[in-house]
Amino acid sequence: MAKYLYEKHGPDAEAPVAGKSLVELGAGVGVPGMAAHVLGAKVLLTEQAHVIDLIQWNTKTHFAGEGLEASELDWYEADGDIGTFDFILACDCIYEPLYGESWKALLKQMVVLSHEGTRVFVSAEERTNDGVAKFLEAASETFEYETVHSAGKVSVYEMRRR
Ligand SMILES: C[S@@+](CC[C@H](N)C(=O)[O-])C[C@H]1O[C@@H](n2cnc3c(N)ncnc32)[C@H](O)[C@@H]1O
């Protein structure tokens, strides 16, 4: 995802991420969001409570200054009070054997956090019973989507509101 962002939304791209707001959901260590920050986006990395301390340490240690923040956001509990974003990222967050049907709550966050022009990027690895097709089918009620990048079993989908 970080490579994709650099190539398609980097400094020389038609739609650069620089100056845009971006939220990463289920960020883990937050590499794609951090890459977007380096490219000039105003970034919020979000995660569940038990992971957020690590991300906050990571961002404060490696990125002094403004434009990169981390905060707790559980897909089941968030109430949409943080506004909308120009870009939304969710990488490897859909995998039913591990996370059940939490993709439904994830999708709800994508709807709540997006505006008409938001570009949502979801990356997912093709695995047995992963639930990705179900996510995409449910997402298509609100978003148009296309596969914008594939590498082996990993695909990046771009979704935009209908
Ligand atoms: C496989 S990891 C991917 C992490 C990172 N995006 C990456 O690509 O390395 C899935 C992430 O989703 C997060 N996650 C799972 N359920 C969540 C929920 N209900 N709310 C917020 N984050 C959640 C987990 O904490 C985990 O970091």
Image (spheres, rainbow, N blue to C red):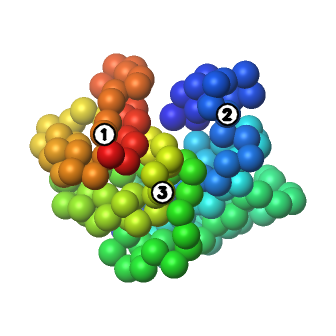
Q: Position of residue 18 (x, y in %)?
A: 73, 41
- Residue where numbered disc 2 is placed: 16
Q: Look at 40% across and 25% down and name the residue there.
A: 148
Q: Position of residue 141 (x, y in %)?
A: 21, 51
Q: Look at 48% across and 43% down and name the residue there.
A: 119
What distance separates the C-alpha of mark 3 from that of mark 2? Answer: 18 Å
Amino acid marked by disc 3: His
Amino acid marked by disc 1: Glu
Looking at the image, residue 59 lies above or below residue 9:
below
In what element is the residue under mark 3?
A: strand
Q: Is residue 103 left or right of residue 70?
A: left
- Residue where numbered disc 3 is placed: 115
Earlier residue among tags 3 and 2: 2
Q: Look at 64% across and 66% down and name the residue there.
A: 70
Earlier residue among tags 2 and 1: 2
In what element is the residue under mark 1?
A: strand
Q: Is residue 128 left or right of residue 46?
A: left
Q: Mark 1 Cα within 10 Å, few/some/many (few <14, many 20+)?
A: few
- CB atoms at circles 3 and 2 under 8 Å apart? no
Looking at the image, residue 18 lies above or below residue 9:
below
Mark 2 Cβ and ligand 1 under 8 Å apart: no
What distance separates the C-alpha of mark 2 from that of mark 1? Answer: 21 Å
Mark 3 Cβ and ligand 1 under 8 Å apart: no
Q: Position of residue 102 (x, y in %)?
A: 26, 63
The residue nearer to you, when weighing 48 against 85, is 85
- Residue where numbered disc 1 is placed: 144
